[in-house]
Amino acid sequence: SNNGAYYFAANKPSDPHYADSHSGGVMVDSANFSMNQGPIYGNVTTNGGNVKASSLIQGTIDNNVPFTLPPFVLPSNLPAAQASPSTVTSTTTITPSSPASASNPTYYVLTSLSGNLTIAQSGSSQTYVAIHVLGDITGKITVNTGVRALIFFNGDISVKARDLDNQSGLAANLQFYGISPTNGGSQTINIAPPGSLAATFYAPSADFSTNGNPDITGAIVCKTYYGNGNTSLH
């Protein structure tokens, strides 16, 4: 569903308190899969690839698993947007007037997000917020504990890992949804060092890349994925 997400434990695989936190798998709907180093603790499936057994892959391997990812469109059941803010180009805090709900979140539409945005809790209740960014996301997003945020975006994301500050540490509380371009254009998500983040990304038309040492806790659905350096994904 559009409000769905997955939560992966925010701990290193060596942490004995989270024995299953390193069981994430990789699914590729093509034969193009390249892995130079670094372990995968879950399963690997491809569509026509030639991945062979390796000490780096601890799960099962299946090279005959095709699947389809339809383009993502903005959900049609979002409520009316709040009057402000309409853009974030400097330091801005959003504090909804009520906690709202998962099925009816407080909704904002931003033309751009290049400044520092903080999403604050409404009172002491779990607070639900949805934001639609019509352009690119290049600024910092801080999601306070007690907030679950859905971020829909039409443009690209280019940030440092530390700029996506999900203070609860729960990946499900910061969810990004890339709206597929309708004109055949491209969409990119680039996570640069330094820092770590906990979030989920559902962007079936986006090229996702990360380099350096970002440590990501969550789940990623994308068109292509590239990681280089000491990047890690739990």
Image: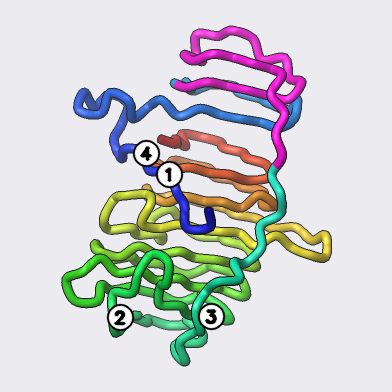
Q: Which residues are magenta?
A: 42-68
Residues tagged 1 and 2 counted as in contact (Cβ below 8 A): no
The amino acid marked with disc number 3 is Leu
Taking the view exactly as shown, the residue that stands out farthest to the left is 124
The amino acid marked with disc number 2 is Thr
Q: Measured from the top left, where is residue 40 in percent x and y?
A: 48, 22
Q: Which residue is mark 2?
A: 95
The amino acid marked with disc number 1 is Tyr
Q: Residue at x 64, y 9 (%)?
A: 52
Does the magenta run of residues contain 47? yes
Give the number of the disc on residue 6: 1
Q: Is residue 6 left or right of residue 206?
A: left
Give the number of the disc on residue 8: 4
Q: Distance of mark 4 from mark 2, alpha carbons? A: 27 Å
Q: Secondary structure at mark 3?
A: strand
- Chief secondary structure of the magenta portion: loop
Residue 45 higher or lower than 140, as above or below: above
Q: Distance of mark 4 from mark 3, alpha carbons? A: 29 Å
- Closer to the chain start, of discs 1 and 2, is 1
Q: Secondary structure at mark 1?
A: loop
Residues tagged 4 and 1 counted as in contact (Cβ below 8 A): yes
The amino acid marked with disc number 4 is Phe
Q: Distance of mark 3 from mark 2, alpha carbons? A: 15 Å
Q: Residues within 10 Å of mark 2 (few under 14, many from 20)?
A: some
Q: Which residue is mark 3?
A: 110
Q: Residue at x 48, y 73 (%)?
A: 131
Q: Residue at x 47, y 70 (%)?
A: 139
- Closer to the chain start, of discs 3 and 2, is 2
